Image: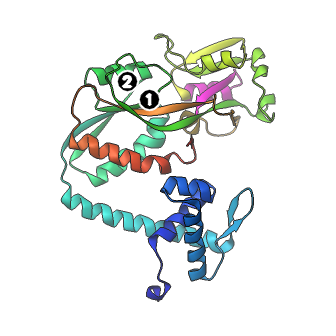
Amino acid sequence: MIERLDLQLSWLASFVAVVDHGGFTAAGRALGRSQPRVSAHVAALERVLGSALLVRTSKEVALTAAGARFLPKARAALAEIRSGVDEVRTLHTELNGRIIVGGYPGLSAVLLAPLMQRFRRLHPGVTVVLREGDPAQLEEALAHGEVDLALRTSDVPQVHHDIPSAHLFHEKIVLVVPEDHPLATASPVDLGLLARETVMVTGDPYGGWTDYRDRLDRVGADPVEIMVISQPTTIAALVAAGLGVAILGAFAAQVAVFGAGTVIRPLPAPLWQREIRVYRKAGRTTTKQVDAFLGLLYQEAPALTARTAVW
């Protein structure tokens, strides 16, 4: 009987987090628990089940056959409990109104879309509108009260210093190359090879903002040409067609780069990562709706970005 198993939800959460984040230390960071506590949770769960769920090595953890069978059940149990909690909470939280959230391509798909979906389930009376733009456009929208909050890179310095912000995470910056390119397998990646390449980056071709060009200068990479394109999907298509290589944020690469023909290569931190911050509307008191969205953002961002962001 399940009563005799005396399972604890924290054990299930720790087990799932270890799998999702690739290790006990990373799982602890995501859950706000110490690594020994996460390890103890998994060990307790294994004792109750009578089977090892994970194979532990010095470099990684992997699922055993029992772990692979139990994982979807653990996920489903946690999802059901979370759904039940959400439904009860909505009975006591009757928020209404409209909020406008700013983001940029890639991040909107990986982080904001599932976050907005979850927020709508929690607060069905609130309409959440998404507005995308480059960092300068998002800052101007905040300054003029056109959006309530925005997520953007801090690479571009603020012009309106009265806009408050808070750190969220660091997004990786990656290299995208054709699968038959020398950089597809080179280890480490030698950016000196870009001297013979057309390099595509995201940015505003007309507004003067171009992402990552300063980093290329700092490593002494001097491409034949730097092509500035606003849409990551266009960049991915050009790379797949063999027309150059690209430097993209990991969110955009995750969404735009798909199918055969291209390879995503990591670049070394800390240079090849960028801070993402959340910015609030300037000079105005936030509403309960905005505070609720921010609370959910801080709660959910680690899990939604676990496979993409550097923490």
* Residue highlighted by disc 1: 152
Place residue 135 in its image quadrant.
Answer: top left
**Relative to 5, is 246 above or below?**
above
**Crowdedness of circle 1 by 10 Å Cα count: few (<14), some, many (20+)?**
many
Q: Which mark is residue 234?
A: none
Image position, residue 131 (x, y; %): 35, 30
* Residue highlighted by disc 2: 138
Kindly check if marks 2 and 1 are in contact, taking CB atoms under 8 A apart as contact. yes
Circle 2: element type: helix
**Span shown in magenta:** 233-249
**Relative to 2, is 292 above or below?**
above
Q: 49 or 161, which lies in front? A: 161
Scheme by which the image is coloured: rainbow
Image position, residue 226 (x, y; %): 64, 14
Q: 46 or 117, which lies in front? A: 46
Q: How many badges with numbers are in the image?
A: 2
Q: Amino acid at mark 1?
A: Arg
Place residue 271 in its image quadrant.
Answer: top right
Left or right, 127 with respect to 243, comes to left
Circle 1: element type: strand
Q: Quadrant of the C terminus?
A: top right
**Relative to 270, is 73 above or below?**
below
Which residue appears at 30% of the width and 54% of the height? 121
Left or right, 20 with respect to 186, comes to left
**Relative to 308, is 244 above or below?**
above
Is residue 290 covered in magenta?
Answer: no
Place residue 220 in its image quadrant.
Answer: top right
Is residue 234 covered in magenta?
Answer: yes
Left or right, 84 with respect to 302, comes to left
Residue 126 in view: yes
Which residue appears at 59% of the width and 53% of the height? 26
Which residue appears at 67% of the width and 18% of the height? 218
